[in-house]
Image (cartoon, rainbow, N blue to C red):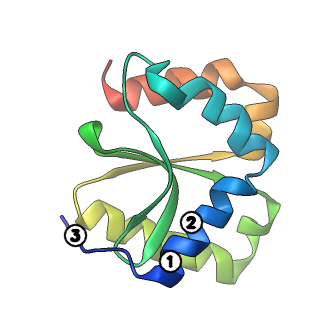
Amino acid sequence: MDERLIPEPHLSYSRNLRRDQAIWEAKLWQQLRAGRFYGLKFKRQVQIGGYIFDFSCRSKLVLIELDGGHHFEKVVSEKDKAKQQYAQSQGYNVIRFWNSDLDNNLEGVMQEIKKVCRV
């Protein structure tokens, strides 16, 4: 897997994303942080290659992406596809949820994460 040092622009960007997280990211983070989810260690805004992913559990090789409405746009969805293909080429499983999933079915989201993490 690609474990290079993170270039400063990416590091600053990911720090800003953590500081200014969307309400859906905060909602999921409350479920995942501090080993609350089956003792697994998750991190937020993690760089893998040239991409930043919303959440990562490296021990399980799982990445989680939360998508809002702008991900329906063709340009954004094509970037998402390339990002996912890269992560998969590095051995990661990528799971995606719509922000509305967190609003309407948090329990189902957590069950899907549990299934993919095999816990």
Give the amino acid type for the residue marked by disc 2 in the picture. Answer: Ser
Q: Residue at x 64, y 55 (%)?
A: 18
| CB-based contact (under 8 Å), mark 1 and mark 2 | yes
Q: Secondary structure at mark 3?
A: loop
| Labels 3 and 2: the sequence-earlier one | 3
| CB-based contact (under 8 Å), mark 3 and mark 2 | no
Q: Residue at x 36, y 26 (%)?
A: 40
Quarter of the image where one finds residue 86: bottom left
Residue 91 appears in the rendering: yes
Question: Quadrant location of the C terminus?
Answer: top left
Q: Residue at x 22, y 67 (%)?
A: 3
Residue under numbered circle 2: 14
Q: Which mark is residue 10?
A: 1
Tell me the crowding category of disc 2: few under 14, some 14 to 19, or many 20 or more residues within 10 angstroms, Cα based: some
Q: 110 or 48, which is in the foreground?
A: 48
Q: Secondary structure at mark 1?
A: helix
Q: Secondary structure at mark 2?
A: helix
Residue under numbered circle 3: 2
